[in-house]
Image (spheres, rainbow, N blue to C red):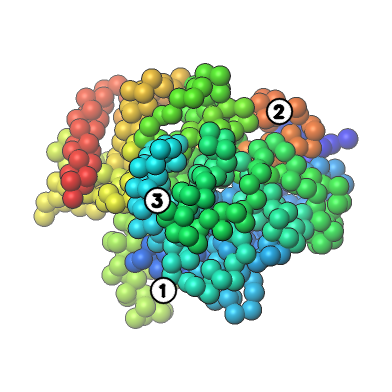
Amino acid sequence: MKDYVIGIDFGTDSARAILVDAADGTVLSGRTSMYPRWAKGLYCDARTQQFRQHPLDYIECLETVLKGVVAECPDPSAIRAIAVDTTASTPCFCDAQARPLALLEGFEENPNAMFVLWKDHSGTEEAKVITRTATSCETNYTCLCGNDYSPECFWSKVWHLINVDEAVYKAGVSVIELCDFIPALLTGVQDWHDIKPGRCVAGAKHLWSERWGGFPPDSFFDSLDPRLAPIKDRLVAVNATSDHVAGKLCSEWAAKLGLSTDVKVGYGMIDAHSGGVGAGIRTGRYVINMGTSGCLMFVMPKEVIGDRIVDGVFGQADDSIIPGCVGFEAGLSAMGDAYAWFRKLISWPLQQMAAQHPELAAVIEEAQDGMIARLTEAAEALPLDVDAPFANDNFNGRRSPNPTADITATIAGLKLTTQAPEIFRAIAESTVFGFKAITDYLEKCGIEAESFVGVGGISRKSPYIMQMFADAFGRDLAISDCKDSCAMGVAMFAAVIAGIYPDIEAAQDAMCPAASVVYHPDKSKAEYYAARYEKYLAAVRFSEQE
């Protein structure tokens, strides 16, 4: 009899579910659903770096994608388990029944009652105060996140919400992370005490660590704001790794999907971390998830890393990627977002024309959709010119090395003769060099990669940038053949909690696909990229001084 599992990935723009044969990782069905309110730009303000998502977007898309893959299952009774990954930190205030406040009357259209998306930087000032306070304490509670607490992390977002919205603060009983909300929804949690927090997000984003006995003490939160310690006390302090069962499918969702209430549901996981698992992350193998942002992940056995802290890395957490290992997360705050920004920038006249002439909107939209492809083709045809325009990659701050939200991007070397493909190439190079700066830093810390694996949309869609990566690093870059590595990673965890495999390593051995392509470095370009990398570093130093 077959055993099937489902992995669900909640990304920045959409939810994706895959139905997987647990025996060998064959994907039998996949469904994607775009968040409808998010797609309209609702509840967001890029000028203030506010990015919010309505819980109904998640709930509606969850039902759509699950019904889609279950409908194509050869035998739904053989579905053993479901596991979920999401963006993080993406928290939301909830009521005593663990319902996000935006689902309650009076809060339906309030962005502060919604989930605060990972890339929301509206809590930048709060993040700075947390960093200053933590680094001056006897115990530095930011030592595991590069000594700089990010506005992308939990407490920055929560503190900002209570600073700007008294009504949300008073109505909120607790705060629920997106990757904990989806399992709670599927298992029918109706009391905030029954939320099952995942170790992955708690350790990587919530300042939770066994080193200091869980969350920092009340005295730390009181030194920030007396309103924070009561919130901390209403978070479920006990968490578990993603190879544990959070519960079973509740009767409501079982009826919707036509599944048994015996289906197990796993603890939630961070999407990028799950993508690392889906791509076969191992000690010595760096996995680089290339999407709207860029995330470089690696793991080290606990007995090897011991009590050592790698300063300057965005995230270091026990059991956050593979249980039993210390998981590390570094990366870029903008990768695909940087390319999309440039496309939007040069499309501005077209957007204005479309607004004034609706009859041209379809043609203009088609032109915009193909713009990155045309820019890529033109950039690839450019001669290798060391003195061409250059840039750094800090369009949305810097995660690693040495994270800071204050640094901005720089584009330099522009002339009146500069064309758009030259600027696009500079931006693409900057993202590649951003990863190189991270790996160079890790090598100085004594951590070296034996191999690199690329996953995510950009790794599959842009051979140009992947070849640039291999050339600039002087190393092979293998691309995972897994189209949905994040969903596949949690599908592997689903297979573990179903009892099909004893641990995640065994599940990876059976279910991980081989590389689809390997990019080899063109050594004749080594001197060019070495010179361009020095220009990138100069642009970073310039931005740091601003």
Crowdedness of circle 2 by 10 Å Cα count: few (<14), some, many (20+)? some
Relative to residue 84, is residue 51 depicted above or below?
below
Which of the 4 image quarters holds residue 533? top left
At 37% across and 48% down in the image, what residue appears? 133
Residue tagged 2: 503
- Kindly report which numbered mark, 2 or 3, lies closer to the viewer in this rendering: 3
Q: CA distance from mark 3 to mark 1?
A: 46 Å
Question: Looking at the rendered structure, which numbered label has been put on residue 130?
Answer: 3
Three-letter code for the amino acid on which mark 3 is drawn: Ile
Three-letter code for the amino acid on which mark 1 is drawn: Ala
Where is residue 490 drawn, in percent x and y? 65, 41
At 20% across and 32% down in the image, what residue appears? 534
Mark 2 secondary-structure assignment: loop
Q: Compare marks 1 and 2 and give the one earlier in the sequence.
A: 1
User: Camera-side residue: 324 or 435?
Assistant: 324
Name the quarter where the N terminus is drawn: top right
Residue 181 visible at all: yes
- Kindly report which numbered mark, 1 or 2, lies closer to the viewer in this rendering: 2
Q: CA distance from mark 1 to mark 2?
A: 52 Å
At 38% across and 32% down in the image, what residue appears? 311
Residue 417 is left or right of residue 304, and the answer is left
Which of the 4 image quarters holds residue 542? top left
At 53% across and 55% down in the image, what residue appears? 229
